[in-house]
Amino acid sequence: MSRSPDGRPGGARPRRRAVLLGLTAGAATALTTGLPLARAADAPYEPVLYWSKILEGAVKATGGAPGPAARAAAIMHLAMYDAANSLVPIGRPYLAKQPVLGTASLNAAIATAAYTALRALYPSGSFDGNYGFALSQDTSSQTEKDKGAAVGRGAAQALVQARANDGEAATVTYTPDGVPGSWRTTGPGPAVTPHWGRVTPFGESTPGQFRPGPPGGFTTYQDLLRSSQYAEQLHEVRVFGGHSSTPLTTVVRTPEQSDIGRFWANDLDGTYKPTSQLYQHARIIARKQALTPTQNVRLFAVLSIALADAAVAAWDAKYDTPIDLWRPVSAINLADSDGNPATTPDPAWRPLSSDLDGSSYTPAFPAYVSGHATFAGAWGGVLRTYFATDAVAFSATTDGGTTTRRFNTLSAATNENAISRIYLGVHYRWDAEQGLATGENVARNVTDTYL
């Protein structure tokens, strides 16, 4: 995926040698049977954006941690990229180009790559209706569709096979450090995906390569907890991130800050999770910028590498460093154990973040660094490089359609995403700031290699 004439907006049109896009102008609709994994896609039909939206539906239906969702997106988007790149010279192959015999449909190649990848990644789901719809939007001949489908199938099978032993299914027993400051359960379940920092990255990097320094520079729990920085950050999340005021804590969060916290939340199963929200925003921007399918397939491939590797980097920091930092709810409830005279406990404090039944909810993994912030940094870094500017404005409505936020720059969106975790009561400021920086480092490595 090196630089190519069609790599960015305003580039030359792709050569049509042995390639037919053959799309109709029909609007996309949801066609699905079996488990409800497919969701209505954005109209008008565009193959990359369509399958990105279908993947979002699968994530919402199956739930799970952010890392597996980011991995699935990377496999699908990279399969689509390698399929398209086999037909149109877009850039450097991710794995390899597939053989092409005669004139082939680009739409069928992209659609079949996505369909084949999704069937492997979500075997309980049914994507047949979506696949049929995607092919129905193609005016190419059946022979051309068949040849494109063969390319897409081969690209997806190669990606799935290449990731078969990447460590995503490893079983790891996590034992908390068991001292003040160390992570402990905040709900009924155990620590989630403690192995994800050791999953093989998609980019040209290694696990641990982007590991940030420890929170505040402190390498022991005792030094961290007794510091003035810790007391300041704990106070900030206490007064801005509480669900409501208690006899010991006055919450000062504004209504807009509450909206910000909820807009970016997407922690619960049934939501589209943090990475799918960022893909949604990328789709909004891609449509606004009128990107072509070949431009989209490249942008989303590079973005998928960055988001998948951001998950590895964030979870490495969470679990594989000397400080597995406890969440604010633990820190505030148990402040009498931290040894810091500037902090006081509030056993009644709960975060704004809540489960569907209204009970307190905090994600089941250590606080430092914020996964949301790391994903945001990676997302913003890729898009800034791709468009060669930060001045990309867009509006988006949160999952469920309750809140719309408007952003004039990519940085405004990424910074708000990061700070939202304080308003939600589940992170400290250094989680947000170092998460952003880590994600930006991941993006820089990915764009230097693939853009």
Image (cartoon, rainbow, N blue to C red):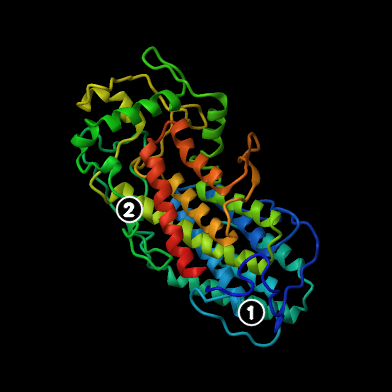
Can see residue 120? Answer: no
Give SS at disc 2.
helix
Query: Residue 59, relative to residue 397: is it above or below?
Result: below
Q: Is residue 32 left or right of residue 163?
A: right
Determine which of the numbered discs, if any, sits on residue 189 in the image. Answer: none
Residue at the extreme top? 247
Report how far apart the C-alphas of labels 2 and 1 lie in the structure. 37 Å
Residue 298, image x, y percentages:
58, 67
Query: Residue 289, relative to residue 214: is it above or below?
Result: below
Residue 354, image x, y percentages:
48, 30
Depth check, front residue: 109 or 297: 297
Mark 2, other Cα within 10 Å: few <14 / some 14–19 / many ≥20: many
Quadrant in the rendering for residue 309 = bottom left
**Disc 2 + disc 1, Cβ < 8 Å:** no
Residue 361, image x, y percentages:
43, 32
**Total marks placed:** 2
Residue type beneath disc 2: Asp
Residue type beneath disc 1: Leu
For the point 48% across and 41% down, the residue is 267
Read off the residue under disc 2: 316
Quadrant in the rendering for residue 406 = top right
Determine which of the numbered discs, if any, sits on residue 87 in the image. Answer: 1
